[in-house]
Image: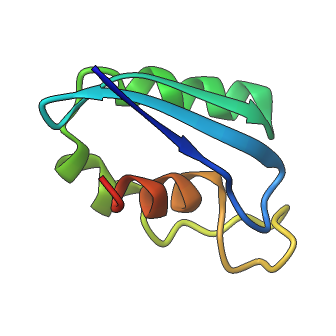
Amino acid sequence: METLTIKPQNVCSREMIVHHEDGVIVDVQIIGGCQGNTQGVCALLKGRKIDDVIPILEGIKCRGSRTGETSCPDQLAKGLKTI
């Protein structure tokens, strides 16, 4: 199993930790941000293929983000693209 640590930009969350194996997400932890929402995102991603979740998360915008141009899911998608 491999681990990806993402340092998101311009959002409330401070860190995202993705455990993955053979292109499948095993576990996700998001530190900071809207706790209920981030827990929901993490639960929904477990067991899914990385290539399947990137287009779902990519481009989502959050009113709470500092720029209004990104979100925690969007930042997670950007990080997943580096795998």
Residue 3 shown left or right of residue 5 in the figure: left
Image coordinates of residue 79 in percent, x first then y, are 47, 56
Above or below, 57 relative to 46: below
The residue at 40%/27% (across/down) is 44
Image coordinates of residue 5 in percent, x first then y, are 55, 40
Image coordinates of residue 83 in percent, x first then y, are 29, 52
Disc count in the image? Answer: 0
The residue at 48%/72% (across/down) is 59
Residue 68 shown left or right of residue 18 in the figure: right
Above or below, 79 relative to 53: below
Q: Please tell me which residue lies in front, 64 or 77.
A: 77
Residue 57 shown left or right of residue 13 in the figure: left
In the figure, residue 54 lies in which quadrant?
A: bottom left
Q: Please tell me which residue lies in front, 5 or 72.
A: 5
The residue at 30%/28% (across/down) is 20
Colour convention of the picture: rainbow
Location of the N terminus (image quadrant): top left
Q: Residue furthest left?
A: 22
Q: Residue furthest front?
A: 2
Image coordinates of residue 31 in percent, x first then y, are 75, 31
Above or below, 21 relative to 63: above
The residue at 54%/66% (across/down) is 60
